[in-house]
Image (cartoon, helix red, strand yellow):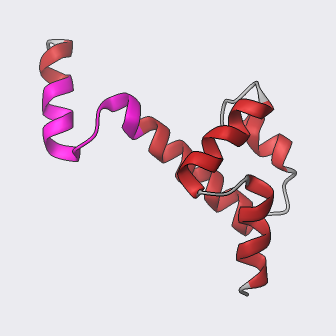
Amino acid sequence: MNPDHLTRLFKKETGHTITDYALLERIKLVKELLTQTNIPISSISSSVGYSNFSHFTNVIKIFAEMGPTEYRSQFRDHK
């Protein structure tokens, strides 16, 4: 299959580019790990492919509207 054709089909079906979809899935995994485990945040960052912890923190702030520590704390406060 032609890569351009695949990209168009994927966006038509999901509403996202392949890159955006992969990022959203990564963020979804991060949120699950933050709320359902006690794994250190730095280990979560590494396990989902971020070698730069500051970049990881900034990405989480964009998608979760708070840092990873705050996200984890807020979820645990509501249990």
- Spot the residue most to the top: 2
> Which of the image's four quarters has the N terminus?
top left
Q: Please indicate whether residue 60 sits to the left or right of residue 76 in the image.
A: left
In this figure, what is the number of numbered marks? 0
Q: Residue at x 63, y 58 (%)?
A: 31
Is residue 63 left or right of 16 when viewed as pictured?
Answer: right
Q: Foreground: 53 or 2? A: 53
Residue 4 location (% of width, % of height): 17, 15
Residue 1 sits above or below residue 75 on the image? above
The spot of residue 66 in percent (x, y) is 67, 57
Residue at point 55%, 43% (across, down): 26
State the image coordinates of residue 46 (x, y, percent, origin top left). Answer: 76, 34
Q: Is residue 23 above or below residue 40?
A: above
Res. 45 image quadrant: top right
x, y percent for residue 56: 70, 36
Q: Is residue 8 magenta?
A: yes
Magenta segment:
7-21
Question: In the rendered image of this protein, does residue 36 appear above or below residue 45?
Answer: below
Q: Residue at x 80, y 70 (%)?
A: 73
Q: Residue at x 48, y 38 (%)?
A: 23
User: Is residue 23 shown in magenta?
Assistant: no
The one of 58 and 44 positioned closer to us in this rendering? 58
Decide if residue 67 is on the left or right side of residue 16: right
Question: In the figure, residue 12 lies in which quadrant?
Answer: top left
Q: Give the main secondary structure of the magenta stretch.
A: helix
| Res 79 → quadrant | bottom right
